[in-house]
Image: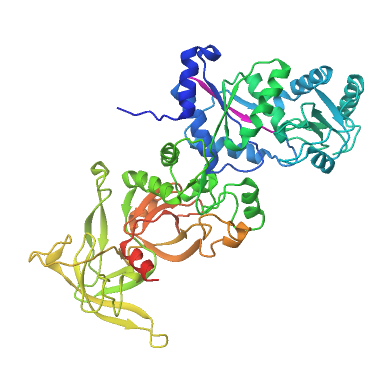
Protein backbone atom coordinates (compact mmCIF):
# COMPACT_ATOMS: atom_id res chain seq x y z
CA UNK A 1 0.00 0.00 0.00
CA UNK A 2 1.42 3.38 -1.04
CA UNK A 3 2.13 5.73 1.85
CA UNK A 4 1.26 9.31 0.92
CA UNK A 5 3.64 12.03 2.06
CA UNK A 6 2.58 14.25 4.90
CA UNK A 7 3.81 17.67 6.02
CA UNK A 8 2.51 20.86 7.59
CA UNK A 9 1.18 22.20 4.27
CA UNK A 10 -0.83 19.06 3.58
CA UNK A 11 -2.15 19.14 7.15
CA UNK A 12 -3.33 22.75 6.64
CA UNK A 13 -5.10 21.71 3.43
CA UNK A 14 -6.74 18.72 5.13
CA UNK A 15 -8.09 21.00 7.86
CA UNK A 16 -9.35 23.49 5.26
CA UNK A 17 -11.15 20.72 3.38
CA UNK A 18 -12.67 19.42 6.58
CA UNK A 19 -13.93 22.93 7.39
CA UNK A 20 -15.31 23.43 3.87
CA UNK A 21 -13.02 26.40 3.25
CA UNK A 22 -12.83 27.61 -0.37
CA UNK A 23 -15.89 25.43 -1.11
CA UNK A 24 -13.67 22.40 -0.34
CA UNK A 25 -11.53 23.15 -3.39
CA UNK A 26 -7.75 22.82 -3.76
CA UNK A 27 -6.24 25.00 -6.46
CA UNK A 28 -2.49 25.68 -6.48
CA UNK A 29 -0.15 27.30 -8.97
CA UNK A 30 3.51 27.19 -9.98
CA UNK A 31 4.47 30.83 -10.74
CA UNK A 32 7.99 31.09 -12.24
CA UNK A 33 9.48 34.34 -13.49
CA UNK A 34 10.67 33.81 -17.09
CA UNK A 35 14.04 35.47 -16.47
CA UNK A 36 16.24 32.36 -16.51
CA UNK A 37 16.15 28.59 -16.60
CA UNK A 38 14.59 26.59 -13.78
CA UNK A 39 16.86 24.75 -11.35
CA UNK A 40 16.41 21.80 -9.02
CA UNK A 41 15.11 24.11 -6.29
CA UNK A 42 12.20 24.93 -8.60
CA UNK A 43 11.71 21.19 -9.08
CA UNK A 44 10.85 20.96 -5.39
CA UNK A 45 8.19 23.66 -5.83
CA UNK A 46 6.85 22.05 -9.01
CA UNK A 47 6.54 18.65 -7.32
CA UNK A 48 4.89 20.22 -4.28
CA UNK A 49 2.31 22.36 -6.10
CA UNK A 50 1.38 19.85 -8.81
CA UNK A 51 1.68 16.94 -6.37
CA UNK A 52 -0.69 18.49 -3.83
CA UNK A 53 -3.22 19.33 -6.55
CA UNK A 54 -3.19 15.73 -7.77
CA UNK A 55 -3.33 14.26 -4.28
CA UNK A 56 -6.38 16.31 -3.28
CA UNK A 57 -8.16 16.04 -6.65
CA UNK A 58 -7.53 19.70 -7.31
CA UNK A 59 -5.99 21.85 -10.04
CA UNK A 60 -2.60 23.46 -10.54
CA UNK A 61 -1.94 26.38 -12.88
CA UNK A 62 1.29 27.21 -14.65
CA UNK A 63 1.54 30.99 -14.41
CA UNK A 64 4.41 33.10 -15.64
CA UNK A 65 5.00 36.16 -13.48
CA UNK A 66 6.23 38.19 -16.42
CA UNK A 67 6.35 41.66 -14.86
CA UNK A 68 9.92 42.68 -15.79
CA UNK A 69 10.35 42.87 -19.58
CA UNK A 70 14.04 43.85 -19.32
CA UNK A 71 14.99 40.39 -18.05
CA UNK A 72 12.40 38.11 -19.63
CA UNK A 73 12.65 36.13 -22.84
CA UNK A 74 10.48 33.72 -24.82
CA UNK A 75 13.39 31.24 -24.62
CA UNK A 76 12.94 31.07 -20.86
CA UNK A 77 9.18 30.58 -21.18
CA UNK A 78 9.63 27.62 -23.53
CA UNK A 79 12.37 26.07 -21.38
CA UNK A 80 10.16 26.29 -18.28
CA UNK A 81 7.29 24.52 -20.04
CA UNK A 82 9.66 21.79 -21.25
CA UNK A 83 11.03 21.32 -17.72
CA UNK A 84 7.60 21.00 -16.09
CA UNK A 85 6.52 18.44 -18.70
CA UNK A 86 9.78 16.50 -18.32
CA UNK A 87 9.16 16.22 -14.57
CA UNK A 88 5.88 14.51 -15.43
CA UNK A 89 3.31 17.23 -14.76
CA UNK A 90 0.53 18.64 -16.95
CA UNK A 91 -1.14 22.02 -16.48
CA UNK A 92 -3.63 21.12 -19.26
CA UNK A 93 -5.25 24.33 -20.55
CA UNK A 94 -4.28 26.35 -17.45
CA UNK A 95 -1.31 28.30 -18.83
CA UNK A 96 -1.51 31.87 -17.62
CA UNK A 97 0.63 35.01 -17.51
CA UNK A 98 0.62 37.93 -15.11
CA UNK A 99 0.63 40.09 -18.24
CA UNK A 100 -2.86 38.71 -18.96
CA UNK A 101 -4.00 40.76 -15.98
CA UNK A 102 -2.13 44.06 -16.49
CA UNK A 103 -5.35 45.92 -17.32
CA UNK A 104 -7.11 44.55 -14.25
CA UNK A 105 -4.10 45.39 -12.08
CA UNK A 106 -4.23 48.94 -13.41
CA UNK A 107 -7.96 49.20 -12.62
CA UNK A 108 -7.39 47.87 -9.10
CA UNK A 109 -4.62 50.43 -8.61
CA UNK A 110 -7.01 53.21 -9.63
CA UNK A 111 -9.46 51.89 -7.02
CA UNK A 112 -6.77 52.10 -4.35
CA UNK A 113 -5.92 55.67 -5.39
CA UNK A 114 -9.58 56.64 -5.13
CA UNK A 115 -9.71 55.10 -1.64
CA UNK A 116 -6.67 57.12 -0.62
CA UNK A 117 -4.65 53.92 -0.29
CA UNK A 118 -2.13 54.61 -3.07
CA UNK A 119 -0.26 57.65 -4.36
CA UNK A 120 2.17 58.72 -7.05
CA UNK A 121 5.63 59.41 -5.63
CA UNK A 122 8.40 61.45 -7.28
CA UNK A 123 11.23 60.08 -5.16
CA UNK A 124 13.79 58.06 -7.13
CA UNK A 125 14.88 54.57 -6.12
CA UNK A 126 17.78 55.74 -3.94
CA UNK A 127 15.60 58.27 -2.17
CA UNK A 128 12.86 55.70 -1.55
CA UNK A 129 15.49 53.42 -0.03
CA UNK A 130 16.78 56.24 2.17
CA UNK A 131 13.28 57.20 3.34
CA UNK A 132 12.37 53.57 4.10
CA UNK A 133 14.42 53.43 7.32
CA UNK A 134 16.05 50.32 8.79
CA UNK A 135 15.10 47.31 10.87
CA UNK A 136 15.63 49.42 13.99
CA UNK A 137 14.58 52.86 12.75
CA UNK A 138 11.17 53.82 11.31
CA UNK A 139 10.89 55.25 7.83
CA UNK A 140 9.97 58.81 6.83
CA UNK A 141 6.90 59.72 4.84
CA UNK A 142 7.43 60.81 1.25
CA UNK A 143 6.78 64.53 0.66
CA UNK A 144 4.38 63.40 -2.11
CA UNK A 145 2.40 61.05 0.15
CA UNK A 146 -0.54 63.41 0.68
CA UNK A 147 -1.27 64.44 -2.88
CA UNK A 148 -4.96 64.73 -3.71
CA UNK A 149 -6.80 61.81 -5.25
CA UNK A 150 -7.37 63.88 -8.38
CA UNK A 151 -3.68 64.70 -8.81
CA UNK A 152 -2.69 61.06 -8.22
CA UNK A 153 -5.20 59.84 -10.81
CA UNK A 154 -3.96 62.38 -13.35
CA UNK A 155 -0.28 61.52 -12.78
CA UNK A 156 -0.94 57.78 -12.84
CA UNK A 157 -2.74 58.09 -16.17
CA UNK A 158 0.22 60.09 -17.57
CA UNK A 159 2.58 57.38 -16.27
CA UNK A 160 0.57 54.85 -18.25
CA UNK A 161 0.78 56.98 -21.39
CA UNK A 162 4.55 57.11 -21.13
CA UNK A 163 4.82 60.85 -20.48
CA UNK A 164 7.51 60.45 -17.81
CA UNK A 165 11.00 58.98 -17.95
CA UNK A 166 12.05 55.67 -16.39
CA UNK A 167 12.49 55.89 -12.63
CA UNK A 168 11.09 59.40 -12.34
CA UNK A 169 7.87 58.34 -10.62
CA UNK A 170 6.28 55.30 -8.99
CA UNK A 171 2.88 54.35 -7.68
CA UNK A 172 3.15 53.39 -4.01
CA UNK A 173 0.72 51.82 -1.56
CA UNK A 174 -0.07 54.08 1.41
CA UNK A 175 0.30 51.84 4.43
CA UNK A 176 2.58 52.66 7.38
CA UNK A 177 6.08 54.10 7.24
CA UNK A 178 6.59 53.22 10.92
CA UNK A 179 5.69 49.54 10.52
CA UNK A 180 8.07 47.03 12.05
CA UNK A 181 7.83 45.14 8.75
CA UNK A 182 9.81 47.09 6.15
CA UNK A 183 7.71 45.55 3.37
CA UNK A 184 4.73 47.51 4.70
CA UNK A 185 6.44 50.90 4.49
CA UNK A 186 4.62 52.22 1.44
CA UNK A 187 5.88 49.63 -1.06
CA UNK A 188 6.07 50.41 -4.77
CA UNK A 189 3.21 48.96 -6.82
CA UNK A 190 4.05 50.23 -10.34
CA UNK A 191 7.26 51.61 -11.86
CA UNK A 192 7.85 53.34 -15.18
CA UNK A 193 9.69 51.19 -17.68
CA UNK A 194 9.90 52.04 -21.37
CA UNK A 195 10.66 48.50 -22.47
CA UNK A 196 9.12 46.07 -24.95
CA UNK A 197 7.38 43.12 -23.33
CA UNK A 198 7.67 39.67 -24.91
CA UNK A 199 3.86 39.32 -24.98
CA UNK A 200 2.32 42.80 -24.79
CA UNK A 201 4.89 44.58 -26.95
CA UNK A 202 4.93 48.35 -26.37
CA UNK A 203 1.40 48.63 -25.03
CA UNK A 204 2.54 49.34 -21.47
CA UNK A 205 4.97 51.91 -20.11
CA UNK A 206 4.34 50.98 -16.48
CA UNK A 207 4.78 47.53 -14.99
CA UNK A 208 3.54 46.13 -11.66
CA UNK A 209 5.94 45.02 -8.96
CA UNK A 210 6.04 41.35 -8.03
CA UNK A 211 4.33 41.66 -4.62
CA UNK A 212 1.34 43.42 -6.12
CA UNK A 213 1.10 41.31 -9.27
CA UNK A 214 1.44 38.04 -7.42
CA UNK A 215 -1.46 38.38 -5.02
CA UNK A 216 -3.76 39.92 -7.63
CA UNK A 217 -2.99 37.09 -10.08
CA UNK A 218 -3.69 34.49 -7.37
CA UNK A 219 -6.99 36.18 -6.62
CA UNK A 220 -8.09 36.40 -10.26
CA UNK A 221 -7.29 32.72 -10.86
CA UNK A 222 -9.16 31.53 -7.77
CA UNK A 223 -6.10 29.98 -6.16
CA UNK A 224 -6.85 28.50 -2.74
CA UNK A 225 -3.36 27.89 -1.35
CA UNK A 226 -0.57 30.16 -2.56
CA UNK A 227 2.52 28.13 -1.64
CA UNK A 228 5.72 30.20 -1.54
CA UNK A 229 9.26 29.81 -0.30
CA UNK A 230 10.28 31.09 3.11
CA UNK A 231 11.71 34.42 1.97
CA UNK A 232 8.14 35.54 1.25
CA UNK A 233 7.02 35.06 4.85
CA UNK A 234 7.69 38.74 5.65
CA UNK A 235 5.77 39.67 2.51
CA UNK A 236 2.60 37.85 3.60
CA UNK A 237 1.15 40.87 5.50
CA UNK A 238 1.49 42.86 2.26
CA UNK A 239 -0.15 40.03 0.26
CA UNK A 240 -3.06 40.13 2.72
CA UNK A 241 -3.21 43.95 2.81
CA UNK A 242 -3.58 44.35 -0.95
CA UNK A 243 -6.38 41.79 -1.21
CA UNK A 244 -8.21 43.03 1.90
CA UNK A 245 -7.94 46.66 0.79
CA UNK A 246 -9.33 45.74 -2.63
CA UNK A 247 -12.05 43.58 -1.08
CA UNK A 248 -11.48 40.76 -3.56
CA UNK A 249 -11.23 36.97 -3.31
CA UNK A 250 -8.41 36.11 -0.87
CA UNK A 251 -6.22 32.98 -1.19
CA UNK A 252 -4.07 31.80 1.72
CA UNK A 253 -0.29 32.22 1.40
CA UNK A 254 1.79 29.45 3.00
CA UNK A 255 5.58 29.47 3.14
CA UNK A 256 8.01 26.54 3.16
CA UNK A 257 11.80 26.25 3.23
CA UNK A 258 13.49 26.40 -0.16
CA UNK A 259 15.97 23.75 -1.26
CA UNK A 260 19.62 24.44 -0.50
CA UNK A 261 21.95 21.85 -2.00
CA UNK A 262 25.61 21.32 -1.12
CA UNK A 263 28.37 21.91 -3.68
CA UNK A 264 26.16 24.10 -5.84
CA UNK A 265 24.38 27.45 -6.02
CA UNK A 266 20.66 27.85 -6.55
CA UNK A 267 20.53 31.60 -7.05
CA UNK A 268 19.30 32.56 -10.50
CA UNK A 269 21.55 35.62 -10.40
CA UNK A 270 24.60 33.46 -9.75
CA UNK A 271 23.61 30.90 -12.37
CA UNK A 272 23.29 33.68 -14.95
CA UNK A 273 26.81 34.80 -14.00
CA UNK A 274 28.18 31.31 -14.55
CA UNK A 275 26.64 31.21 -18.02
CA UNK A 276 27.44 34.74 -19.14
CA UNK A 277 31.05 34.63 -17.88
CA UNK A 278 31.74 31.29 -19.56
CA UNK A 279 32.40 29.21 -16.45
CA UNK A 280 30.02 26.62 -17.90
CA UNK A 281 28.91 25.75 -21.42
CA UNK A 282 25.39 27.19 -21.30
CA UNK A 283 22.28 26.68 -19.20
CA UNK A 284 22.13 22.97 -20.00
CA UNK A 285 25.75 22.22 -19.07
CA UNK A 286 25.51 18.92 -17.15
CA UNK A 287 27.38 20.50 -14.23
CA UNK A 288 24.61 23.07 -13.77
CA UNK A 289 21.79 22.47 -11.26
CA UNK A 290 19.28 23.65 -13.87
CA UNK A 291 16.61 21.15 -14.81
CA UNK A 292 17.87 21.27 -18.40
CA UNK A 293 21.38 20.60 -17.10
CA UNK A 294 20.47 17.62 -14.95
CA UNK A 295 18.33 16.29 -17.79
CA UNK A 296 21.33 16.41 -20.13
CA UNK A 297 23.47 14.77 -17.46
CA UNK A 298 21.09 11.82 -17.46
CA UNK A 299 19.08 12.27 -14.27
CA UNK A 300 15.61 10.78 -14.52
CA UNK A 301 12.39 12.64 -13.68
CA UNK A 302 11.34 9.74 -11.46
CA UNK A 303 14.50 10.11 -9.39
CA UNK A 304 14.04 13.86 -9.03
CA UNK A 305 10.45 13.37 -7.85
CA UNK A 306 11.69 10.73 -5.39
CA UNK A 307 14.39 13.11 -4.14
CA UNK A 308 11.88 15.91 -3.61
CA UNK A 309 9.64 13.55 -1.67
CA UNK A 310 12.52 12.31 0.50
CA UNK A 311 13.72 15.77 1.52
CA UNK A 312 10.16 16.68 2.49
CA UNK A 313 8.66 20.07 3.25
CA UNK A 314 9.94 22.03 6.24
CA UNK A 315 9.53 25.45 7.84
CA UNK A 316 13.26 26.01 8.37
CA UNK A 317 16.06 26.33 5.83
CA UNK A 318 18.67 23.59 5.82
CA UNK A 319 21.44 22.31 3.56
CA UNK A 320 20.69 19.04 1.78
CA UNK A 321 23.74 16.91 1.02
CA UNK A 322 24.39 16.34 -2.69
CA UNK A 323 25.03 12.69 -1.72
CA UNK A 324 21.30 12.22 -1.09
CA UNK A 325 20.44 13.45 -4.60
CA UNK A 326 23.10 11.15 -6.08
CA UNK A 327 21.74 8.26 -4.01
CA UNK A 328 18.25 8.82 -5.43
CA UNK A 329 19.62 8.94 -8.99
CA UNK A 330 21.72 5.82 -8.45
CA UNK A 331 18.83 3.98 -6.81
CA UNK A 332 16.56 4.59 -9.80
CA UNK A 333 19.12 3.83 -12.48
CA UNK A 334 20.23 0.66 -10.73
CA UNK A 335 16.83 -0.83 -11.48
CA UNK A 336 16.44 0.41 -15.05
CA UNK A 337 19.83 0.89 -16.71
CA UNK A 338 21.33 -1.83 -18.89
CA UNK A 339 24.80 -3.00 -17.87
CA UNK A 340 27.54 -2.78 -20.50
CA UNK A 341 31.32 -2.77 -20.49
CA UNK A 342 33.37 0.29 -21.39
CA UNK A 343 37.03 1.13 -20.90
CA UNK A 344 37.64 4.82 -20.27
CA UNK A 345 41.44 4.92 -19.91
CA UNK A 346 42.55 1.97 -22.03
CA UNK A 347 45.58 -0.25 -21.57
CA UNK A 348 46.08 -2.97 -24.20
CA UNK A 349 46.24 -6.63 -23.13
CA UNK A 350 47.53 -9.37 -25.43
CA UNK A 351 46.64 -12.93 -24.37
CA UNK A 352 49.65 -14.71 -25.75
CA UNK A 353 48.26 -18.27 -25.53
CA UNK A 354 44.88 -17.40 -27.08
CA UNK A 355 44.50 -18.44 -30.74
CA UNK A 356 45.03 -15.61 -33.22
CA UNK A 357 42.03 -14.62 -35.38
CA UNK A 358 39.65 -16.42 -33.01
CA UNK A 359 36.55 -14.73 -31.55
CA UNK A 360 34.15 -16.11 -28.97
CA UNK A 361 30.68 -14.89 -28.13
CA UNK A 362 30.25 -14.76 -24.37
CA UNK A 363 26.94 -14.31 -22.59
CA UNK A 364 26.55 -11.20 -20.39
CA UNK A 365 23.70 -10.23 -18.07
CA UNK A 366 21.90 -7.00 -18.98
CA UNK A 367 20.67 -6.17 -15.48
CA UNK A 368 20.90 -8.46 -12.45
CA UNK A 369 18.17 -6.36 -10.78
CA UNK A 370 15.72 -7.16 -13.58
CA UNK A 371 15.99 -10.65 -15.11
CA UNK A 372 13.38 -9.71 -17.71
CA UNK A 373 16.01 -7.55 -19.42
CA UNK A 374 17.72 -10.79 -20.50
CA UNK A 375 21.27 -11.24 -21.74
CA UNK A 376 23.47 -10.18 -24.65
CA UNK A 377 26.53 -11.50 -26.44
CA UNK A 378 29.92 -9.82 -26.08
CA UNK A 379 32.89 -10.74 -28.31
CA UNK A 380 36.16 -11.97 -26.78
CA UNK A 381 39.45 -12.12 -28.68
CA UNK A 382 43.22 -12.29 -28.27
CA UNK A 383 43.64 -8.50 -27.85
CA UNK A 384 41.64 -6.61 -25.25
CA UNK A 385 41.51 -3.28 -23.48
CA UNK A 386 41.33 -2.98 -19.70
CA UNK A 387 41.38 0.11 -17.50
CA UNK A 388 44.88 1.49 -17.01
CA UNK A 389 44.07 1.94 -13.31
CA UNK A 390 43.42 -1.80 -13.03
CA UNK A 391 47.15 -2.57 -13.37
CA UNK A 392 49.99 -1.72 -11.01
CA UNK A 393 53.56 -2.78 -11.67
CA UNK A 394 54.40 -2.48 -7.99
CA UNK A 395 51.05 -2.84 -6.23
CA UNK A 396 50.47 -1.61 -2.67
CA UNK A 397 49.10 -4.02 -0.10
CA UNK A 398 45.42 -3.12 -0.57
CA UNK A 399 45.53 -3.35 -4.38
CA UNK A 400 44.05 -6.67 -5.61
CA UNK A 401 43.76 -6.01 -9.32
CA UNK A 402 46.18 -7.03 -12.05
CA UNK A 403 49.93 -6.99 -11.35
CA UNK A 404 52.97 -8.98 -12.62
CA UNK A 405 52.49 -12.67 -11.83
CA UNK A 406 49.00 -12.09 -10.47
CA UNK A 407 45.80 -13.74 -11.69
CA UNK A 408 42.44 -12.00 -11.99
CA UNK A 409 39.03 -12.76 -13.46
CA UNK A 410 37.73 -11.06 -16.61
CA UNK A 411 34.01 -10.40 -16.31
CA UNK A 412 31.97 -13.14 -18.09
CA UNK A 413 35.22 -14.53 -19.60
CA UNK A 414 38.36 -16.20 -18.19
CA UNK A 415 41.07 -15.99 -15.59
CA UNK A 416 44.15 -14.25 -16.92
CA UNK A 417 47.66 -13.92 -15.46
CA UNK A 418 50.07 -11.09 -16.25
CA UNK A 419 53.45 -12.36 -17.45
CA UNK A 420 55.03 -9.20 -18.86
CA UNK A 421 54.56 -5.42 -19.07
CA UNK A 422 55.83 -3.77 -22.26
CA UNK A 423 57.14 -0.21 -21.85
CA UNK A 424 57.84 2.69 -24.15
CA UNK A 425 61.65 2.87 -24.37
CA UNK A 426 61.60 6.67 -24.33
CA UNK A 427 59.07 7.50 -21.62
CA UNK A 428 59.04 4.29 -19.61
CA UNK A 429 55.23 4.25 -19.79
CA UNK A 430 53.57 0.84 -19.89
CA UNK A 431 51.96 0.48 -23.30
CA UNK A 432 50.88 -3.16 -23.34
CA UNK A 433 50.45 -6.16 -21.06
CA UNK A 434 51.17 -9.73 -22.05
CA UNK A 435 49.01 -12.25 -20.25
CA UNK A 436 48.04 -15.89 -20.42
CA UNK A 437 44.54 -17.28 -19.94
CA UNK A 438 43.16 -20.50 -18.50
CA UNK A 439 40.71 -22.05 -21.01
CA UNK A 440 39.11 -24.06 -18.20
CA UNK A 441 37.78 -20.91 -16.55
CA UNK A 442 35.35 -19.87 -19.29
CA UNK A 443 32.43 -17.98 -17.77
CA UNK A 444 34.61 -16.71 -14.95
CA UNK A 445 34.83 -19.74 -12.64
CA UNK A 446 37.69 -22.13 -11.93
CA UNK A 447 37.04 -25.91 -11.91
CA UNK A 448 39.68 -26.36 -9.21
CA UNK A 449 37.97 -23.71 -7.07
CA UNK A 450 41.06 -21.49 -6.86
CA UNK A 451 40.23 -17.98 -5.82
CA UNK A 452 41.08 -14.60 -7.31
CA UNK A 453 40.49 -11.33 -5.52
CA UNK A 454 39.45 -9.10 -8.41
CA UNK A 455 37.16 -9.11 -11.43
CA UNK A 456 37.94 -6.66 -14.23
CA UNK A 457 35.79 -5.33 -17.05
CA UNK A 458 37.22 -5.27 -20.57
CA UNK A 459 36.38 -4.88 -24.25
CA UNK A 460 37.67 -6.72 -27.31
CA UNK A 461 40.11 -4.41 -29.10
CA UNK A 462 39.07 -5.45 -32.61
CA UNK A 463 35.34 -5.12 -31.89
CA UNK A 464 35.20 -2.11 -29.59
CA UNK A 465 33.67 1.23 -30.63
CA UNK A 466 35.70 4.36 -29.97
CA UNK A 467 33.77 6.90 -27.88
CA UNK A 468 34.13 10.21 -26.09
CA UNK A 469 33.30 10.25 -22.39
CA UNK A 470 32.72 13.31 -20.21
CA UNK A 471 33.30 12.79 -16.51
CA UNK A 472 31.47 15.37 -14.42
CA UNK A 473 32.19 16.23 -10.80
CA UNK A 474 30.82 18.84 -8.40
CA UNK A 475 30.90 22.32 -9.91
CA UNK A 476 32.29 23.69 -6.62
CA UNK A 477 34.94 22.44 -4.22
CA UNK A 478 33.13 23.62 -1.05
CA UNK A 479 29.73 22.49 0.30
CA UNK A 480 28.68 26.15 0.67
CA UNK A 481 30.33 28.06 -2.21
CA UNK A 482 31.56 31.52 -1.23
CA UNK A 483 30.79 31.12 2.47
CA UNK A 484 34.41 31.72 3.48
CA UNK A 485 35.63 34.03 0.71
CA UNK A 486 32.45 35.99 0.03
CA UNK A 487 32.71 35.20 -3.69
CA UNK A 488 31.17 31.92 -4.78
CA UNK A 489 33.29 31.83 -7.94
CA UNK A 490 36.51 31.41 -5.93
CA UNK A 491 35.26 27.92 -5.03
CA UNK A 492 34.70 26.76 -8.63
CA UNK A 493 36.12 23.28 -9.16
CA UNK A 494 38.79 23.35 -11.93
CA UNK A 495 38.35 19.57 -12.27
CA UNK A 496 34.56 19.57 -12.60
CA UNK A 497 34.88 18.21 -16.15
CA UNK A 498 37.36 15.60 -17.40
CA UNK A 499 37.13 15.01 -21.13
CA UNK A 500 38.24 11.57 -22.34
CA UNK A 501 38.53 11.53 -26.11
CA UNK A 502 39.68 7.93 -26.74
CA UNK A 503 37.56 5.48 -24.82
CA UNK A 504 36.27 2.11 -25.99
CA UNK A 505 32.80 0.62 -25.49
CA UNK A 506 31.46 -2.81 -26.33
CA UNK A 507 29.87 -3.23 -29.79
CA UNK A 508 26.33 -3.60 -28.41
CA UNK A 509 26.37 0.22 -28.08
CA UNK A 510 26.63 0.70 -31.85
CA UNK A 511 22.94 1.61 -31.94
CA UNK A 512 22.88 3.73 -28.76
CA UNK A 513 20.94 6.92 -29.33
CA UNK A 514 20.74 10.26 -27.58
CA UNK A 515 18.85 9.89 -24.31
CA UNK A 516 19.76 6.25 -23.66
CA UNK A 517 21.11 5.35 -20.23
CA UNK A 518 23.60 2.64 -19.29
CA UNK A 519 25.64 1.43 -16.39
CA UNK A 520 29.27 1.05 -17.43
CA UNK A 521 30.22 -1.82 -15.16
CA UNK A 522 32.41 -0.68 -12.27
CA UNK A 523 32.52 2.87 -13.69
CA UNK A 524 29.11 4.46 -13.08
CA UNK A 525 25.93 5.43 -14.89
CA UNK A 526 26.20 7.15 -18.26
CA UNK A 527 23.88 9.01 -20.61
CA UNK A 528 24.17 9.34 -24.39
CA UNK A 529 24.64 13.07 -25.05
CA UNK A 530 22.96 14.98 -27.87
CA UNK A 531 26.43 15.54 -29.39
CA UNK A 532 26.67 11.81 -30.02
CA UNK A 533 27.04 10.47 -33.59
CA UNK A 534 26.98 6.96 -35.01
CA UNK A 535 30.66 7.33 -35.90
CA UNK A 536 31.62 8.45 -32.39
CA UNK A 537 29.14 8.23 -29.53
CA UNK A 538 29.43 10.68 -26.63
CA UNK A 539 28.57 9.67 -23.07
CA UNK A 540 28.05 11.89 -20.02
CA UNK A 541 28.68 10.35 -16.63
CA UNK A 542 25.45 10.81 -14.69
CA UNK A 543 26.71 9.56 -11.35
CA UNK A 544 29.58 7.36 -10.21
CA UNK A 545 29.31 4.01 -8.49
CA UNK A 546 30.62 3.56 -4.99
CA UNK A 547 34.27 2.62 -5.41
CA UNK A 548 35.98 0.98 -2.42
CA UNK A 549 39.47 1.45 -3.86
CA UNK A 550 38.81 5.13 -4.54
CA UNK A 551 37.87 5.52 -0.87
CA UNK A 552 41.11 3.84 0.19
CA UNK A 553 43.21 6.13 -1.99
CA UNK A 554 41.25 9.20 -0.85
CA UNK A 555 41.87 8.22 2.78
CA UNK A 556 45.60 7.96 2.06
CA UNK A 557 45.67 11.44 0.53
Based on the displayed image, in which of its 4 quarters is residue 489 positioned? bottom right
Say left or right for 375 vs 347.
left
Say left or right for 358 vs 301.
left
Residue 17: horizontal and vertical position, in percent? 48, 16
**Which residue is located at x 90 percent, y 25 percent?**
147
8 w.r.t. 404: above or below: above
The way the protein has been coloured in the rendering is rainbow
Residue 95: horizontal and vertical position, in percent? 60, 26
Residue farthest along the bottom direction in this orientation:
425
Main secondary structure along the magenta-highlighted residues: strand
423 w.r.t. 301: above or below: below
Residue farthest along the left direction in this orientation:
448
Residue 64 covered by magenta stretch: yes
Q: Nearer the viewer, residue 47 or 375?
A: 47
Residue 205 covered by magenta stretch: no
Residue farthest along the front direction in this orientation:
136
**Which residue is located at x 32 percent, y 55 percent?**
340
Bounds of the magenta span? Answer: 58-66
Image quadrant occupied by the C terminus: bottom left
Based on the displayed image, in which of its 4 quarters is residue 391 positioned? bottom left
Q: Nearer the viewer, residue 47 or 527?
A: 47
Based on the displayed image, in which of its 4 quarters is residue 460 positioned? bottom left
**Which residue is located at x 39 percent, y 51 percent?**
511
Residue 428: horizontal and vertical position, in percent? 38, 85
**Which residue is located at x 81 percent, y 42 percent?**
130
Q: Nearer the viewer, residue 51 or 434?
A: 51
Residue 524: horizontal and vertical position, in percent? 37, 56
Image quadrant occupied by the N terminus: top left
Q: Nearer the viewer, residue 177 or 491?
A: 177
Amino acid sequence: MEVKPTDFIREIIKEDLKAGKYDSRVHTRFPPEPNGYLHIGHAKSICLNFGIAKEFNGLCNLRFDDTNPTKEEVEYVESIKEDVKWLGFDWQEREYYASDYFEKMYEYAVELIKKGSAYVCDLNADEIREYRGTLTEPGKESPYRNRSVEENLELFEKMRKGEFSDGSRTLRAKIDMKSGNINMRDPVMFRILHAEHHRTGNKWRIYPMYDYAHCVSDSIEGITHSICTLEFEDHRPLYDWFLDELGVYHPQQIEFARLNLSYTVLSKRKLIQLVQEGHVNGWDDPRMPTISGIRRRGYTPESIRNFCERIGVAKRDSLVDMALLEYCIREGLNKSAQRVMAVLKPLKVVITNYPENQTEELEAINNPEDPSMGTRKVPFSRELYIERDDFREDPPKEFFRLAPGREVRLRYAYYIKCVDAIKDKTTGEITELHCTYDPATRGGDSPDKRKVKATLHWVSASHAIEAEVRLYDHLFTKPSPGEESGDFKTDLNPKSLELLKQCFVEPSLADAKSGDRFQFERMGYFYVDRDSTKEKPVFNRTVALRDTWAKIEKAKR
